[in-house]
Amino acid sequence: MLGVGPGLGLRLAAAEVEPLGHVRGVDPSPLMVTARCVSLVADSIVELADGTSERTGCDSALVDAAISVNNIMLWNRPAGVAELARVLRPGGRLAITVMM
C-alpha cells in the first residue's frame, strides 16, 4: 500500500490476507507510520516502511497487488508507475483512486 495515511487501508488489506498473507505499507512521512496497526505489525501481517511510489524498497516481481488512495498527485508519476511495474508480479494488480 502506497501512502498509508491513518492506517485504515492497511487494516482492511490485512483483514483480506490474514492469516498467511503480508501487507507492506510504504510512506515517506514518519508521521504517517501509524500506531493504529501496532498489533498487525507485531503479528508480522503488516510491515511499515519508509519509501515512496518511486522507491518502494520491494524486490522485483514480488507484489501481488499495489494500492494507492489519494496520493498519486504527490508522485513523480512516470517514475512511480515504472517502480510499480517493476515490483508487481506477472498478473499482479494495481488500484489507484482519488476522491474529489
Image: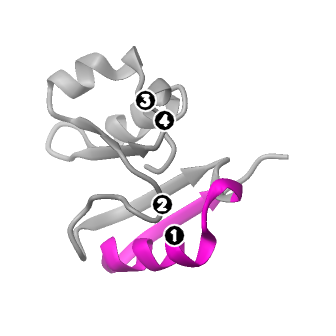
The residue identified by callout 3 is 30
10 Å crowding of disc 4: few (<14), some (14-19), many (20+) = some
Q: Amino acid at mark 2?
A: Ser
> From the viewer's perspective, is 67 left or right of 72?
left
Q: CA distance from mark 2 to mark 1?
A: 5 Å
Vertical placement of 62 versus 53: above or below?
A: below
The residue identified by callout 4 is 29
Question: Which residue corresponds to the image point at 23% horizontal and 75% vertical from the top-left?
Answer: 60
Q: Amino acid at mark 3?
A: Pro
Label 1 secondary element: helix
Are the residues at dot 3 and dot 1 in contact (C-beta closer than 8 Å)?
no
Nearer to us of marks 3 and 1 is 3
The residue identified by callout 2 is 53
Label 4 secondary element: loop
10 Å crowding of disc 3: few (<14), some (14-19), many (20+) = few
> From the viewer's perspective, is 32 left or right of 55?
right
Please tell me which of labels 3 and 1 falls first in the chain. 3
Label 3 secondary element: helix
Instruction: Write the start and end of the magenta stretch as one range.
Output: 73-96
Please tell me which of labels 3 and 2 falls first in the chain. 3
Q: Amino acid at mark 1?
A: Gly
Are the residues at dot 4 and dot 3 in contact (C-beta closer than 8 Å)?
yes
Vertical placement of 60 versus 99: above or below?
A: below
10 Å crowding of disc 1: few (<14), some (14-19), many (20+) = some
The residue identified by callout 1 is 80
Kindly indicate the quadrant of the structure image that contains residue 87: bottom left
**For this rendering, which residue is in front, 99 or 3?**
3
